[in-house]
Amino acid sequence: MTVHIGAKPGDIAETVLMPGDPYRAKWAAETFLKDAVCVNQVRGMLGFTGTWNGRKVTIQGSGMGMPSLSIYANELIRDYGAQTLIRIGSCGGMQDDVAVRDVILAMTASTVSTPSRGIFRELSFAPCADYGLLAAAATAAKDLGVRTHVGGIYSSDVFYDERPDLAAEMERHGVLGVEMEAAELYILAARYKRRALAVLTVSDHLKTHEALPSEDRERSFGDMVEIALRAAFA
């Protein structure tokens, strides 16, 4: 048991999927895991452990933003021995060929600042995914027939951004989408020598302003979870 996770020793699997929304964690556990049990309810940040194809998996909410994810990822790694951490979440598309409902596999995650910024000081560290997970996820997406993009994303530390100039430069440099957590996850994975990946469903588009209807979100998010699980155990 830690300050933010009430799970007992042995309750957390070595493979952890991390959606931001705790209720998305509940939905994913009930939909994809067998015999899923709630192992954390501290501060309402739900976590569940069960099995997928006989493999033990935990799905733990991370909250919104890099500071929140940093708390949970640190505790999952240091106190519970998590080895593979995969963020599953939504993002905003930033390129013309990235459509709503597509899945983005984040090879790299650019950012203005993260909770780890103070460690690096003048160094511009480049957070990146584990290549084995990335390649396995790309294969899984192809097998499932899911339209997928592999490349760089932007992890923002604010939701309501007022920097159209920065967005324009990211678009010009091929950034596929924007979300709020992956960069810090990748940094922590590098620090602790763990595997990490972000598998993201494009739920809205910054240029077209199209948004995924609520009734379609469950099916589209399901593709993302299936890709993550297949990649984890490839």
Image: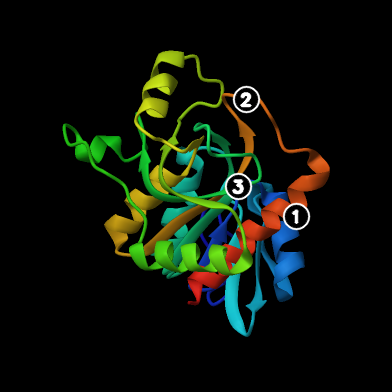
Q: Residues within 10 Å of mark 2 (few under 14, many from 20)?
A: few
Residue with the mark numbered 1: 219
Q: Residue at x 58, y 53 (%)?
A: 147
Q: Which residue is mark 3?
A: 102
At 31% from the left and 47% from the top, the residue drawn is 127
Report helix, strand or loop for mark 3: loop
> In x, y percent, where is residue 204?
64, 34
Q: Which of the image's four quarters has the N terminus?
A: bottom right
Amino acid found under the numbered disc labelled 1: Arg
Question: Which residue in the structure is indicated by mark 2?
Answer: 208
Q: Nearer the viewer, residue 94 or 53?
A: 94
N-term mark: 3 or 2: 3
Q: Which mark is residue 100?
A: none
Give the residue furthest to the left. 122
Q: Earlier in the sequence, mark 3 or mark 1?
A: 3
Q: Quadrant of residue 189?
A: bottom left
Query: Measured along the vertical axis of the image, is residue 146 above or below residue 213?
Result: below
| Earlier-in-chain disc, 1 versus 2 | 2
Tell whether 25 sits left or right of 14: right
Labels 1 and 2 touching (C-beta < 8 A): no
Q: Amino acid at mark 3?
A: Asp
Vertical placement of 31 versus 125: above or below? below
3 vs 1, front mark: 3
